[in-house]
Amino acid sequence: MARIALDSAMMEAAVYGGAVLGGGGGGWIEDGMETGRLALEVGSPQLYTADEMNDEDLLATVALVGAPAAEDQYVKPMHYVRALQLLEKTIQQPIKGIITNENGAGTTVNGWFQAAVTGLPVIDLPCNGRAHPTGTMGAMNLHQVDGYISHQAAVGGKDERYHEVCVSGHLQQAAGLVRKLSVEAGGLVVVARNPISVSYAREHGAQGAILQAIEVGQALLSAKGEAAIEAVCQKLGGRVITAGLVDEFELTTAGGFDVGRVVIKGHEMTFWNEYMTLEHKGERLGTFPDLIMTLDAQTAKPIVSAALEKGQKLAVIHVPKERLILSATMRNRELLAAVESAVHKEILSYVFG
């Protein structure tokens, strides 16, 4: 049982460790640091373990939905609070805790600002311990629960592109509508969604994944350059696959996703927001939900897929999925099958054998 008062050192570690666990997605370090600093300026967010909560307490997931590379995206901290307010008004029941949808530079600290403003705790029970592309992958298999109605409140955009919308319905349909709204809002929206009980989250979520992100970030920030990259690999049980210049890079933003490929020293990676496959000379070295991540080879700064450029010198790391704290969705064949059509690579045979 634990209640941890989150401070600036933990926040920085959470952002940088989250950036690694984002696996190419999960938002931007600068945005995560801005949100984290603001949360600590306006209040004292607390991180609870699930043991601090009652089984029937309702938790709300907070998330960012959209394409990180979208040029017109506009999301501010108060949008996070507004989305939570809209969700609570829709369900007419009190939310007792906040959870994030995933780990990432921006997403590991999802909920910290809302917690600081509202006094609600952040619960270390995220929907996934790594970043993932679709909303359903961050919904703990609720789409398979008979009769479950998904409630989702989305806020984002600026001026005439500002939107705040609540949708209720089948989870995948609601998630699709929110994804479309993100496009209308300029590429990104804040979402508060899918109220669930602590008992359900404990069974299907990624308990302890926020602390894992903090520990990974502490390892990264404890050293510099190659030593920092090695410290991350040692902490996660992964390895450096290669380091070299970005020789080829392709990115298309479509339908609220960043999709593309990158080649570094003969190693090809595909991404769908997050890195999905890693291959060398036809041999598959890593497959989502394995963690594949790029870091600046000299500074060790995590570099998301949307920030790649030809000529960058990057290190590529790989961590087997067994070393990560993952949601039940990462073992769901139906959800992982969607990756194949997005990146045009075989996925299921590598994941399930």
Image (tube, rainbow, N blue to C red):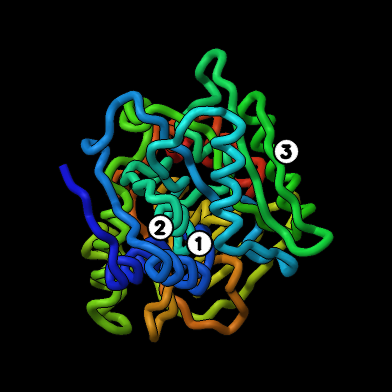
22 vs 240: above or below:
above
244 vs 179: above or below:
below
Q: Nearer the viewer, mark 1 or mark 3?
A: 3
Q: Amino acid at mark 2?
A: Ala
Mark 1 and mark 3: span between their CA atoms? Answer: 24 Å
- Which of 340/172 is in front? 172
- Pinpoint residue 161: horizontal percent, then vertical percent: 80, 58
- SS type, badge 3: helix
Q: Residue at x 56, y 43 (%)?
A: 85
Q: What residue is pinned by disc 1?
A: 24
Q: Is residue 20 visible?
A: no
Mark 2 vs 1, N-terminal side: 1
Mark 2 and mark 3: span between their CA atoms? Answer: 29 Å
Quarter-of-image position of residue 147? top right
Q: What residue is pinned by disc 3?
A: 177
Q: Which mark is residue 171?
A: none
- SS type, badge 2: helix
- Pinpoint residue 174: horizontal percent, then vertical percent: 67, 33
Mark 2 vs 3, N-terminal side: 2
Count of numbered badges drawn on the protein: 3
Mark 2 and mark 1: span between their CA atoms? Answer: 28 Å
- Which of 324/48 is in front? 48
Q: Is residue 28 visible?
A: yes
